[in-house]
Amino acid sequence: MNVTVVFIFAGVAISFASLIFALSSISSKPKRRMQSRIETIRLRAAGQIVVRGDENARTVKKQISSRFPLFERLAKRFLPNQQMLEARLARTGREISIGGYVMVCATTALVVILIAMVILAQPIALALLLGVIAGVGLPHLFIGRMATRRLKQFTEQFPDSIDLIVRGLKSGLPVTESIASVGQEMADPVGMEFRDISDRIKFGQPLDEALWDTARRLDTAEFKFFVISISVQRETGGNLSEALSNLSDILRRRRQMGLKIKAMSSEAKASAIILGSLPFIMFGIIFALNPEYEMALFTDPRGQMMLGTGLGIMTLGVLVMNKMIKFEI
């Protein structure tokens, strides 16, 4: 059998397996969440949940084996900033381990290397470079997009959850019970985060530490405002329900200002999308009419340099425009 056919078959098989794994991971999320809670209760009853802490905080950790032990060991040995990566993966709201993330990165890099070497006939050095860039960049962008979308949903629902806490406080419930009611009444992702806070408190972690742990993981200004309001009230006293009510109003005004900025910049964004898509549209039209004319960009070194330079300049322009239309409120 031809070696080229073997490489193509291996790349397609690995890509198909990765796709099946991703789909099964997404579809089984509720079931895995329920199994995780059952496993937590079982381990707690067996005395296998340990509380580890430093001088200021205690964190409840579950001793559950990883689904990818080989990649977990490799990541723990060679990967820097593992805590930062764990926090980034946790922001997606899905049970993505570091081992699974490293496996997806390695699979993506391998597939891109095979495509560059076998289909595009690129040198091995360039294929390795493209594989490393794609293996590191594409999963990073995908995880970032998932986290951004989830945090956006969290920010939209968060003022309603604060109002629910305010109503609970006015009815005479303590703060912890009000937080637990938010976890029970609100939909995910707000409900999921507040259920996690409530579980930490039930396991014995102080309220302030549980809130700050969640604030560091979410890394959103809105939730940090909420934690600061509760922390200041617990230290100095005062009407917590009134402070949280004012905070809810402020967060809604911040959201209205963000929507106004989005509306004002929508025309410029539409123009940038249209102008940015024109080169690709013309490339597709010319390729459909005369493929040999366009293939020189991929086969000739000068064409490859022109293509890479053009894509790099367009990417830089997109990043600059994206930076210009983002404002800190």
Image (cartoon, grey):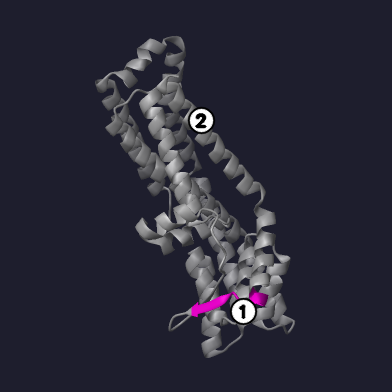
Is 230 above or below relative to 95?
below
Tell me if 268 is positioned left or right of 250 in this view. Answer: left
For residue 131, what is the image quadrant? top left
Q: Nearer the viewer, mark 1 or mark 2?
A: 2
What's the residue at 52%, 57% (across, down)? 257
Q: Amino acid under label 1? A: Phe
> Residue 87: image x %, image y %?
47, 62
Give the x, y percent position of residue 220: 50, 64
Which circle marks residue 12 in the picture? Answer: 2
Q: Quadrant of residue 167?
A: bottom right
Q: Which image quadrant is residue 239 in?
A: bottom right
Mark 2 nearby-residue class (10 Å; few <14, some 14–19, many ≥20): some
Look at the numbered disc 1 and give the secondary structure of its residue.
loop
| Residue nearest the observer in this picture, 250 or 100 | 100
Query: Badge 1, how many Cα within 10 Å: few under 14, some, many 20+?
Result: some
Any part of residue 220 in sight: no
Q: Which mark is residue 236?
A: none
- Taking the spot 53% from the left edge, 62% from the top edge, the residue there is 254
Q: Specify the farthest residue to the bottom.
A: 236
Q: Position of residue 98 (x, y in %)?
A: 47, 56
Q: Is residue 49 magenta?
A: yes
Q: CA distance from mark 1 to mark 2?
A: 47 Å
Residue 267 colored in magenta in the image = no
Label 1 sits on residue:
203
Q: Which residues are magenta?
A: 44-52
Residue 155 visible in the displayed image: yes
Tell me the kind of residue under disc 2. Answer: Val
Give the SS element for disc 2: helix
